[in-house]
Amino acid sequence: WAEYYSESARRWIHLDPCECAYDNPKMYEAGWGKKLTYVVAHSNEEVLDVTRRYTDKWEEVLQRRTLATEDWLRSTLATVQAGITGLLPAERLPVLRQQQEAERHELEGSAVPVALQPGEQVPRQTGDLEWRRQRGEMGPDAK
């Protein structure tokens, strides 16, 4: 999947071209039954842990995030971000900082579960049925 920054919505929006999905970030967890750990987004201007956008089960995700400490992850992403920011034109920085602050606010708000959208409640639709079963993408209640 991918995300794009919508100037009109002033936020990053989830896209999954394989599933014809638009703005359904929780489809992998709620619809497919995936157990997420790390979702890191990057562009030519930033790098960011966006896992919270993709889960309503943050405490469960934290229990699975054992490859690195949360402090190490934050520090590493901040170091990478500083390197990227240092390459950007000065006039772009105020706009980027404003976008990043809005993103932080959105992600912090994502910790509170909200009603799922219909597109987030369906199992994976593409690919061979047996392949989807083997990958565990038939939904959380699939046998």
Image (cartoon, rainbow, N blue to C red):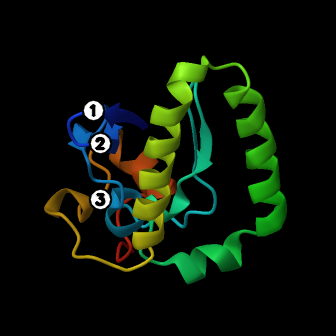
Q: Which mark is residue 7?
A: 1
Q: Is residue 68 left or right of residue 111?
A: right
Residue 8 point in image, percent of width and height: 20, 36
First of labels 3, 1 by sequence position: 1
Which-is-in-front pick, marks 3 and 2? 2
**Which residue corresponds to mark 3?**
123
Name the residue located 63 percent from the left edge and 20 percent from the top edge.
88
Pointer 1: residues within 10 angstroms few (<14), some, or many (20+)?
Answer: few
Q: Which mark is residue 131?
A: none
Identified by mark 1, the residue type is: Glu
Near-viewer residue (53 or 132): 53
Quarter of image, res 35: bottom right
- Secondary element at tag 3: loop
Residue 33, horizontal then vertical, whole percent: 42, 67
Q: Which residue is at a point 19% across and 56% down the rendered structure image?
A: 119
Is residue 139 placed above or below 135 in the rendered structure? below
Image quarter of the N terminus = top left
* Numbered badge on residue 10: 2
Q: Amino acid at mark 3?
A: Pro
